[in-house]
Image: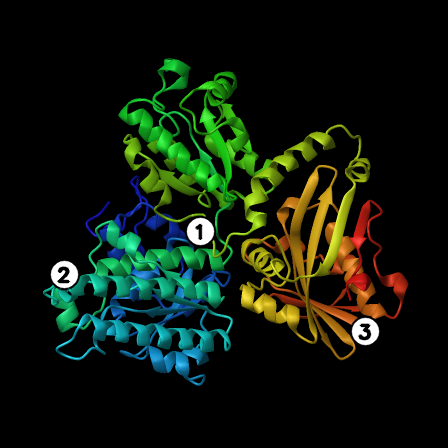
Amino acid sequence: MDQGGLRAGEGGRVTLSELHGSGRLAASYPLVRGLLAELDDGELERAGRLLSRLDPDEVLRAHPSTPVVAVTVTGHRTLGPLLAPLTAELARHGLLVRARLSDFDAYVFDLADPKSELYEARPDLVLCVLDPDTVFDEVPVPWTAEDAERALDAMVTRVRGLAVAFGGRTGATLVLNTLPLPRRFTAQLVDHRSRARLGAAWRRANARLLELGDEIPSVITLDLDPLLAEGVPAEDARLGRYARTGLSPALLARYAREVGHLARHLTGRAKKALVCDLDGTLWGGVLGDDGQEGIELGEGLRGEAFTAFQDVVRQLGSQGVLLAVASKNDPGPVQEALREHPGMALRPDDFVQVTANWRAKPDNLRDLARDLNIGVDSFVFADDSAYECGLVRHTLPEVAVVRLDEEPARHIERLLRDGWFDTRELNAEDRARPARYREEKDRHTFLSSFDSVADYLSGLDVRVRLAPVTGAGISRAAQLTLRTNQFHTGMLRCQAPQVSEAAGGPATRVLGIHSGDRFGDNGMVGVVFTRRAGDTVHIDNFVLSCRVFSRGIETACLSAVLSDARAAGAHAVEAVYRPGPKNSAVRAFYPDHGFTVTGEEDGVLTFRHDLSDPAGIVAPPPHIRFTESLEESR
């Protein structure tokens, strides 16, 4: 890499600094994610300073489909140093940030006043950055541990009130954080008992901040303690005194990385599957050369490190991450090792697919995406080979590549560094996902036994329930809008509070699509947002998981919505299609089902279906069996 740390590779590839110097950076923004992929922290910091000079509107003129995240940064102290790393971290995930920095110590006014510029900016994310001086600026001098405890209690109470007000005014996400406790405060108390009281009070206050997310759905509190435990300094003494910064630039950079993971999730770009190599990745040595008894696993320092890495992979799989293998090996010995090796933490049933052959890994990843019916951009690929990582990164730039090295003790850190599978909330649907994808493989096997798709669908015994979303279904409905990219007509990303509001509105409905068949229950696989205005029902969003494509479920549910609207006295149903990066396949969904185009602006299409003639409502496919009708759920 070059001195500026902005070169992504050799062989004459363009660098970030070259694009900036030639004035082509905005026009070349889709290349930025790849250019940032291999930068270390120092190089990423320099790249962030360069990228933060970009005009977001210039990028959007060249690439109008670039996902934009509007972020407002507010807090108690100087937060300008956060903008560059924030810009870089979002760019690493293909996102464009439109950032607004509030005035110094403006967070109370920003969040309390519904007419403040914060609310007028209509942000997606509000970062309210708290620091130790948020508390100690309210403590008298001299002070005691009890004084600090009172100030802590007042601060948390104030922040909670602001968060409650914020949640009632906007659908945005409010990001808070725990407060570090620097030694420069504890050391001012000369007796250890007072220091202990301060430490206990400080931890109770941080616990209350962390618990706010359970109480207020619009709040996420980032815990800074794990970052501090890695040796990131909480403060910079000189900058804290002269520039009035509350947190060190290093801590703000790591904070920005966590925000980047959150923004990736909120824009529907979270990853779904972890695909691992075997030799040098899940175990040491080469299975084909060393045999099962010769690989490093379970015994010895390196063997224990590989087993610890497998434990972490299995932990991810237990929370809904799809696990798969792509290895250059013969399949027989691989299956035997996974079944029989005594040090193996992962077994064949932990994977949705184990691919062992001698084909190029990008080809295997494409086939795996097809078999699982998900995009390759849902994959995280982990391998110890620089060659294989480079090949996948070059051939399939949508895949997130985790380059492991020859030191297995660092595998865990490298895999978890970027929180690829971070989600706002885990639910039962997440935990059941791997089993459901394994059931999908059984469906493909079942399909191969039929001469026609129609016979296959008839024998599949597809069951559908379309009913209003309530209770725990709120979280799953929000998740579907965040994670689904292909069958997503309105491209409306919703948080749980927004779904809850729509589900409880007098003229709005949120309908969950639940499906099952002879192979098992798929759970909630889709959601339809409708709104009644006069004699017209509007379909604002229609989302369906890629797991259940091509089974006629979408047709059956649309037919049910149309029939229900007519039965309720509506004269027409109107719908909208908003273009997204991957939803072009549903552009024709409404016209194919009897809707006519009524308008188009900036790629957004509006449609209308006249309900005067019931014969004009498309019939549900004959192989679909409804277990509950909308009429029954009213």
Tell whether 342 sits left or right of 192: right
Cβ atoms under marks 3 and 2 closer than 8 Å: no
When the figure is inspected, residue 608 is found, relative to residue 358, above or below; the finding is below
Indicate the amino acid at tag 1.
Answer: Asp
Q: Quadrant of residue 473?
A: bottom right
Q: Amino acid at mark 2?
A: His
Q: Is label 2 in contact with label 1 (beta carbons under 8 Å)? A: no
Residue 54 coordinates in the image, percent (x, y):
34, 66
Distance, label 3 to label 2, CA atoms, is 73 Å
Q: Residues within 10 Å of mark 2 (few under 14, many from 20)?
A: few
Q: Which residue is mark 3?
A: 570
* Residue at image coords 37%, 53%: 92
SS of the residue under disc 3: loop
Whether residue 555 appears in this view of the structure is yes
Residue annotated with mark 2: 192
Percent from the top left, x then y, of residue 592?
76, 56
The residue under label 1 is: 422
Three-letter code for the amino acid on which mark 3 is drawn:
Ala
Position of 602 relative to 353 (above/below) = below
User: Is residue 391 something one can see in this rendering?
Assistant: no
Q: Which circle, 2 or 1, is nearer the viewer?
A: 2
- Horizontally, residue 593 falls left or right of residue 436, namely right
What is the spatial separation of the Cα atoms under label 3 and label 1, in whole angstroms?
42 Å
Name the foreground residue: 622 vs 501.
Answer: 501
> Circle 1: is it few (<14), some (14-19), or many (20+) Cα within 10 Å?
some
Separation (CA) of disc 2 from disc 1: 39 Å
- Residue 142 x, y percent position in the rendering: 12, 77
Q: Position of residue 130 (x, y in %)?
A: 30, 69
Image height of 406 relative to 631, above or below: above
- Depth check: 212 or 301 in front? 212
Q: Earlier in the sequence, mark 3 or mark 2?
A: 2
